[in-house]
Amino acid sequence: MAGYKIIFLCTLLSAVGPFCDGLNNGLALTPPMGWLAWERFRCNVDCKNDPHNCIGEVLFLEMAEKMASGGFRDAGYEYIILDDCWMNMTRDSNGFLIADPERFPSGIPFLSDYIHSVGLKFGIYEDIGTKTCGGYPGIEGYEKQDMQTFADWGVDYVKLDGCYKDPNTFPQSYPQVGAYMNQTGRPMVYSCSWPAYISGGNNTVPWQDIADSCNLWRNYDDIQDSYASLTEIVAWFAQEQDLLIPVAGPGNWNDPDMLLVGDFGLSYDQQKTQMAIWSILAAPLIMSTDLRTLEPQYRRILLNRNVIAVNQDKLGIQGRQIITSKDKGVEVWTRPITPTAKSGNTIVYSYAVAIWNKRDDGTPYPFSNPISQYGLTSKSGYFLRDLYTNQDYGFFLPTDLLTVKVNPSGVIFFKATPVIADR
């Protein structure tokens, strides 16, 4: 309800000025969770020869049904999101966007209604430029009209790409679209690609302006279905973490891109690693796999309530790398989470800790440190519990040594809960 009140205020303000100051939609107070077509299904528009895997009505209806009946909705995955190539190649005679009539014969409002009817929310893709990355109509010149169209269709989440647009215009164009979203009166999560097109090199990225304008934003290159792509993205996040962490929090999230869990390029251990690191990063958990054929071991990763709870922690603090892979080939990432306690006037956090073995020497690697090296310094100690196996490691003081064996390219992921008498 708070989101509606803020949107209404922005609508009133827009009557006296061109834009409301900031997005101010009250949404995405924890990282969004859902399913997006792109990584697994790309721009497959051949519904004649590949009707079960093409970007069309049937695919999204089936994925919505699997989300609702397969436990994903109940675990927090709530958005079903179209990506590129859903549109007709031209607008209609009045300039309105329309779906490809052969692949979406019932139209987008029908699809939106069905997704809502099974207790999920509906997301859609567009591009800030003249065309989408796949060559379909972009929103340039139609920004206000398209946002009203999306509102009329019952859209809950808008992903706005950055192709076919001069990035120098992004500081005006992305906030402008957010203002038009506010003016519709419909709450819509706003996913921007603003920094993905300007990060790297000598460009200065206006992180706070982006956070003021968008609920989440793609930071870096598209993720590909490979361990190399995953590690490259995580390395960039580690390199830039001192700039990224301050702008993350309830309503605003850095987005390293989709989950690869259930796809082809990662091993079982590597998939557990991605899920753990994405949870440490307070990243959106956006699946992009075929839920119709998802194998049980991968389903368990995606539905792990312990790991999801770290990702969705209400404090919204993005975690950081504290030990680099130069240290014995192992990285350690930590994130402050609830429950918190007080020791005098000091807040003592619980922590999620991911120990990632980046070695490739083919055997589980023993890694041993006093837990104080992971930031676990409360003199009263901590209880440690593995978030994947549910194994209790027991009670540790800061000087106590924790020894684990981590599989090659795998992760040990545990939660440390402080023991404080005046909790």
Image (spheres, rainbow, N blue to C red):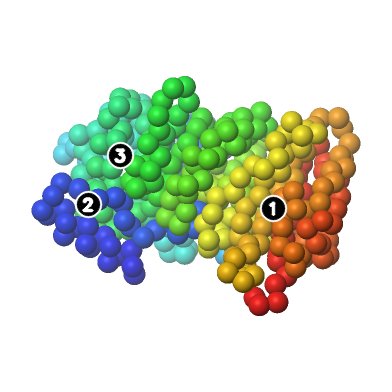
Residue drawn at (51%, 30%) of the image:
221
Q: Which residue is mark 3?
A: 174
What label sits on residue 375 in the rendered view? 1
Left/right of residue 299 with respect to residue 37 in the rendered view: right
Amino acid type, callout 3: Tyr
Amino acid type, callout 2: Cys
Residue drawn at (47%, 54%) of the image:
249
The quadrant of the image that shows the N terminus is bottom left
Q: Which residue is mark 2?
A: 20
Looking at the picture, tell me which residue is in the foreground, 352 or 226: 352
* Circles 3 and 1 in contact, beta carbons < 8 Å: no
Residue drawn at (64%, 75%) of the image:
423
Q: Up-down: is 419 above or below 335? A: below
Q: Up-down: is 359 above or below 215? A: above
Residue drawn at (35%, 54%) of the image:
188
**Which dot, 3 or 1, sits closer to the camera?**
1
Left/right of residue 169 with respect to residue 36 in the rendered view: left
Mark 3 vs mark 2, CA separation in Å: 13 Å
Q: Estimate the x, y position of residue 185 in percent, counting from the top left.
A: 25, 59
